[in-house]
Amino acid sequence: MMITSFTWNDLLFMLDGAKVTILLTLAAMLIGTLAGVVFGLLRALLPVLSLPLAWVLDVFRSVPLLIQFVLFNSLKSIMGLNWSAFTVACVVLGIYVSAYCSEIVRSGVLSVPPNLRRASRSLGLSYWKDLRHIVLPMAMRVAFPGWLNLVLSVMKDTSLVMWIGIVELLRASQTIVTRIQEPLLVLCIAGLIYYVMSLVVARLGARLETRWQEND
Amino acid sequence: MFDYNFHWRAAFKALPDMLGGAWVTFETAALSMILGVLIALALTFMRQGNIRVLRGFAATWISIARNTPSLFQIYILYFGLGSFGLHVSSWAALLAGITINNAGYLAENFRGGLKAVPDTQLRAARSLGMSAPQAYRLIVIPQLLRIVFYPLTNQMVWAVLMTSLGVVVGLNNDLTGITQDYNSKTFRTFEFFAIAAVLYYLIAKLIVVVARLLSWRLFRY
């Protein structure tokens, strides 16, 4: 009953896949957060001027990620760009993350009471100093839980990149399933790896959150 | 600039089929939402209750649904159940997968919503002579649904987007499935998927608009 053809090498292969998943998540979060902070600030500080930006970002939130991957992948071929699938995945995920991140940053910035900003301005801080020393630190504390949720959801969404041919955790486990024909065992291991990765991120985030709140 | 001729006419010819697929997509999402809300309510009350087994069950369900990819959940239903000799169709696997996912996320929303319904409401209802199920059905749950209405519409949009995963387990009659069918017949990937993207966008916007009208009608007072 307990005999299985799942070998040590298969596990290593899956862990390699998990590495790709983590790398993709990191790259997407890096691109997405940088762009998302800029977009979010624009949305919060210039609400009318940046309305077109909001519409564009809304598109990325209303179209399935799978379709976005396929579309962008074919667009890449049409435009004759010689990008690897990994780059395409990073770009698509990065835009996707920035669409969500901008909303998170925007709500964070808007949660800072206007009176506080007026107070800091009347104390002689310039617009940018006020933004840098008063608004952003407070907005960050509000936005952080949302951002953390975004990290977790992006890590799960990276499983879709298998469609454009990147071997990440889920694709790796599927490859093994095709060979050894024990789907339940292999998929359970894959699920466990995902679960552990999510749990670690969530725990680290919770710890960071409590540490920030100590000084409040 | 482009070394490529766009052939939109072939893609537009497929539009009626794709609209049919869009309807299947919408139906699947709506069905999974209805089931998801019911299961999520059950999970929420299980977690509130005193029976340890049920509480553990609800907690396990929610943490698995929230911490693993939805694609993985569909996979394990489609491929994993085969180990027990259960062979489900790809549509059933998709529906069950999305429902599990929805229920997990919604249960978390409902927990927050339930906290926002004041305790005194339940006590007042009980003291007016309602039984506990009556009080929940007539007093607590209506207020809960109003609080979670916005997250609920959000989740509905999510459910529509998640149905696109059916194509990975071989579903071929939803919007993505039909698009993929045409794609493999004609290799006009960009055109077909662009139309699919537009249709998904329209469905998502439609849900948001209908929800807004509905909330306007429902929550007037």
Image (tube, rainbow, N blue to C red):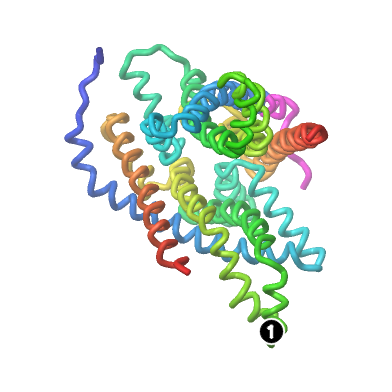
Looking at the image, residue A28 sits to the left or right of residue A196; the answer is left
Q: Report x, y in % for residue A173.
A: 62, 34
Q: Report x, y in % for residue A34.
A: 55, 21
Q: Residues within 10 Å of mark 1 (few under 14, many from 20)?
A: few
Question: Does the magenta run of residues contain A143?
Answer: no
Q: Return the residue nearer the eye: A73 or B126.
A: B126
The answer to whether residue B48 is above or below residue A56 is below
Q: Which residue is mark 1?
A: B131
Magenta highlight range: A1-15
The residue furthest left is B9
The residue furthest bottom is B129
At 55% from the left edge and 51% from the top edge, which residue is drawn?
B97
At 42% from the left edge and 37% from the top edge, which residue is drawn?
A58
Identity, as a three-letter code, of the amino acid under mark 1: Ser
Q: Is residue A20 visible?
A: no
Q: Quadrant of the C terminus of chain A?
A: top right
Q: Is residue A132 visible?
A: yes
